[in-house]
Image (cartoon, rainbow, N blue to C red):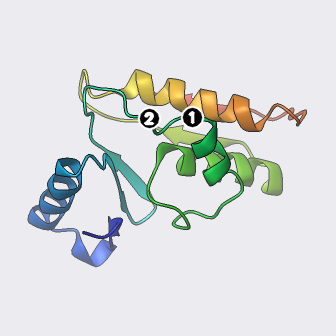
């Protein structure tokens, strides 16, 4: 199963099959176009350390496997390059991991921002 689905594949059965197959392989992130779909595994995987921060820092979306850090990096890069505020929308049911996703995005932004004095804001709505 590839890292994501193309917008032309957006039939419910295709999406569910792809997400389930990836989840069974303990791959909790899937792209649908530029949207990241995350499935809460109700456990922590070792995929949020400094190695992953460095893997996604400065990389284009799709250059690495789907990951929350890829979305955070995209917003951060656009904020620096375009000098425009960015917004990351996190949506889901109660217990789906919105708060944890927000914390992970903030951890990523803090890690990559250690050497920068950025005056603009990244707003995260969960």
Assign a secondary structure to mark 2: loop
Circle 2 sits on which residue? 46
Q: Which residue is mark 1?
A: 49
x 26%, y 46%: residue: 26
Q: Is 33 located above or below residue 56 in the figure? A: below
Would residue 65 be seen by someone viewing this image from the given angle?
yes
Q: Residue drawn at (38%, 27%), measured in percent from left and top?
A: 98
Compared with residue 67, is residue 97 higher up or lower down, i.e. above or below? above
Residue 37, given in percent of the width and then of the height, sits at 33, 49
User: Is residue 125 at all visible to an observer of this figure?
Assistant: no
Q: CA distance from mark 1 to mark 2?
A: 7 Å
Q: Is residue 86 rendered to the left or right of residue 19?
A: right
From the top left corner, tell me how far across and down residue 39 is, in percent.
27, 41
Q: Position of residue 64 (x, y in %)?
A: 52, 62
Q: Residue furthest left?
A: 13
- Answer few, some or many: residues within 10 Å of disc 1's Cα (few below 14, many 20 plus, some between 14 and 19): some
Residue for point 56% across, 33% down: 105
Could you tell me which quadrant the N terminus lies in?
A: bottom left
Mark 2: give few (<14), some (14-19) or many (20+) Cα within 10 Å. Answer: few
Is disc 1 in contact with disc 2, using a CB cutoff of under 8 Å? yes
Residue 36 in the image, given as x and y percentages of width and height: 40, 52
Marking on residue 125: none
Label 1 residue SS: loop
């Amino acid at each position: 199963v590839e890292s994501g689905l193309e917008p032309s594949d957006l039939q419910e059965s295709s999406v569910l099959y792809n997400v389930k197959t990836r989840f069974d392989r303990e791959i909790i992130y899937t792209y649908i176009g530029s949207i990241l779909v995350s499935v809460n595994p109700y456990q922590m995987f070792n995929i949020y350390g400094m190695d992953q921060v460095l893997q996604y820092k400065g990389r284009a979306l799709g250059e690495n496997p789907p990951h929350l850090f890829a979305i955070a990096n995209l917003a951060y890069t656009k904020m620096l390059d375009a000098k425009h505020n960015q917004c990351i929308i996190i949506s889901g049911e109660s217990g789906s991991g919105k708060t944890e996703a927000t914390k992970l995005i903030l951890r990523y932004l803090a890690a990559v921002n250690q050497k920068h004095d950025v005056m603009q804001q990244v707003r995260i709505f969960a």
